[in-house]
Structures are given as C-alpha cells and as structure tokens.
Image (cartoon, rainbow, N blue to C red):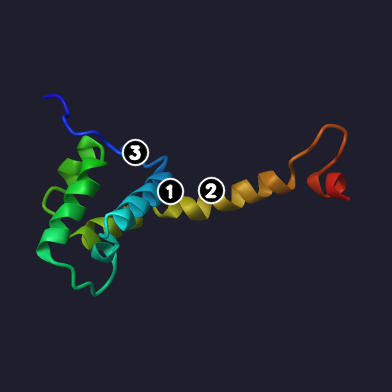
Amino acid sequence: MANISKREFDVLDLSGQKYLEWKVDALAHLKANGLEETIEANNMSSSQDKAKAIIFLRHHLHESLKSEYLLVDEPKELWDNLQERYGHQQKVLLPKAQYDWINLRFQDFKSISDYNS
C-alpha cells in the first residue's frame, strides 16, 4: 500500500545511523505543532495531543521499528525507548568529530591552530 501522507523529514532507519538528525528534526516539528510537552516528564498533555504526537513519531519510524514499538502508546515512553536504544551515538560520534576538527589540516598548515595564528 502506498504511503499517502508526506513525511516532513527522513524516517529513523533500523540501524539508527542518523538518530541525532532524526531527534533534532522530530523535536523541532513537535515544537512547531505545540506538542513538545508530550515527550517531557510529568506532562499533563491531553489525550488528543498525545495521540497526535505518537502518530507523528511513528510516521517517521522504519517499518521494523513501528512493529517493535507497536504497543507503546505514550509519546514520552516511545521517545525514551528510542533514546535508550540509539542515544549512545552522541557519546561515540562527538569525540571523534572533535578529534577530526582539531586535527584537520589546511593546505600547507600542520593544523587548524597553526592556520589561525
């Protein structure tokens, strides 16, 4: 069956390779629609807002992830489950990116620090 409704950004694939991008995009869209409270602790969101948020989040998940989290009906719980599953990437990718930046070389300069001085 063809997917009728358009996605605002890429789905989160099973590998979670672009989880950080997905998380930023999802949060921005939830905020734009006034639904960011649905993924916060101790929220008092209406059941209608929670339903909108869970539909939106599931719409941007890979089919296998949708199946795995099929019985999760709270947006906060889904958000936390995905964070627990893929959140380690920030701890892995950030130090590598910082190392790469520090050791980046520009043409005849040994490092960025030498280039800037």
Q: In the rendered structure, which disc, 2 or 3, sits on the residue that comes first in sequence? A: 3
| Residue 73 showing in the rendered view | no
Q: Contact, CB < 8 Å: mark 2 with mark 1?
A: yes
> Horizontal placement of 96 versus 110: left or right?
left
What kind of residue is marked 3? Phe
| Residue 97 visible in the snapshot | yes
In the image, is residue 105 above or below residue 40? above
| Front position among marks 2 and 1 | 1
Q: Nearer the viewer, mark 3 or mark 1?
A: 3
Disc 1 marks which residue?
20
Q: Residue 115 in the image: x percent, y percent?
A: 85, 44
Q: Position of residue 12 (x, y in %)?
A: 32, 41
State which quadrant residue 32 falls in: bottom left
| Residue drawn where x is 27% and y is 66% of the image | 37
Neighbourhood count class around disc 2 (C-alpha, 10 Å): few under 14, some 14–19, many 20 upward: few
- Local packing at callout 3 (Cα closer than 10 Å; few below 14, some 14-19, many 20+) is few
Q: Which residue is mark 2?
A: 93
- Relative to 99, say whether 84 is above or below: below
Q: Earlier in the sequence, mark 3 or mark 1?
A: 3
Q: Dot 3 corresponds to which residue?
A: 9
**Where is residue 71 shown, x and y percent of the image?**
11, 52
Query: What is the three-letter code of the residue carrying label 1?
Result: Leu
Drawn side of residue 107 relative to residue 6, left or right: right
Mark 2 belongs to which amino acid?
Leu
Q: Determine the residue positioned at 39% across, 46% down.
A: 19
The local secondary structure at tag 1 comes to helix
Q: Nearer the viewer, mark 2 or mark 3?
A: 3
Foreground: 107 or 35? 35
Q: Residue at x 27, y 63 (%)?
A: 39
Tell me the crowding category of disc 1: few under 14, some 14 to 19, or many 20 or more residues within 10 angstroms, Cα based.
some
